[in-house]
Image: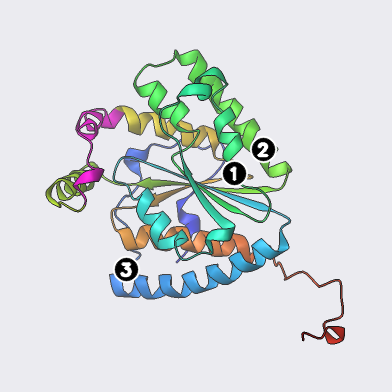
Amino acid sequence: MDPSKHLIKPARNIDLRELSTDETEDMTKPEGKEQLEALTERLVELQNVFYADGSRALLVVLQGMDTSGKDGVIKDVFGPLNAQGCHVDSFKVPAGAETRHDYLWRVHAKCPEKGMIGVFNRSHYEDIGVVRVHNYVPPDIWNNRYRHIREFERMLVEEGTIIRKFFLHISKDEQQERLEARLADPNKRWKFDPKDVEERKLWDAYQEAYSEAIGATSTKYAPWHVVPADHKWYRNLVVATVMVQTLGALNLEYPTPDFDPKKIKVV
């Protein structure tokens, strides 16, 4: 599996409607799950060293249409990690003090500290996509936010945070199936929001908004991957592979103790 095929190069204009949502690389589901199991074991090992080293932070941004699988990635890819070194944050409609600050204020406060992996279930990119589609702010404001976000992410990287961003890309037909399945299952019905049906009517507007946002904010220091997500197992495999490659490339080692273990006697 080579996730680089899903990497969006800097300053590339993209159209999500032209990118595949249905990808398996000729793998079967059992083969993919077997690879994911091995990757998960390796990711756990790498996270332990990353946490112990404590010199860098890692921010993972998950975006996508409703039902694209953000919760699934968190459960299946990041769920096995040591919770002491990994936290998940989500961003809903701004409220209270959040409305009295700039839109990045609440996001910056949730960015991971060194040694930690932070996962954003939705993120500051809502302040480009949703506000644009619903005309909450005029075009000159959300257009400026591309620059704000590039500079914000550059600052985070220069201060020691690694950033990996994933847009979980599903088809409109697949979303329909998942919404219908959610509505039909009493154990999943709580996740169904009637507003999702209304948002679905804005599908093309969201595709256009996120196409432009991804193209404008995929950089060498904070790249986007557009992950085909119609097959949940393949989606998980891509994200896990990128995570293992990212942490493995750091070549970290456990810190050397500042004492001689041979001289320590536990009684």
- Is mark 2 in CB contact (under 8 Å) with mark 1? yes
Q: Amino acid at mark 1?
A: Ala
Packing grade of label 3 (10 A; few <14, some 14-19, many >=20) is few
Please tell me which of labels 2 and 1 falls first in the chain: 2
Q: CA distance from mark 3 to mark 2?
A: 37 Å
Vertical relation: 246 (above or below) 193: below
Residue 79 on image: x %, y % = 44, 61
- Secondary structure beneath dot 2 equals helix
User: What is the spatial separation of the Cα atoms under label 2 and label 1, in whole angstroms?
Assistant: 8 Å
- Give the mark nearer the N terminus: 3 vs 1: 3
Element under label 3?
loop
Residue 226 drawn at (x, y percent):
43, 47
Range covered by the magenta-colored residues: 188-204
Q: How is the image coloured?
A: rainbow
Residue shown at the point (33%, 40%) measured from the top left: 65
For the question of whether residue 28 can be seen, the reply is: no
**Viewer-nearest of labels 3 and 1?**
1
Q: Which residue is mark 2?
A: 154
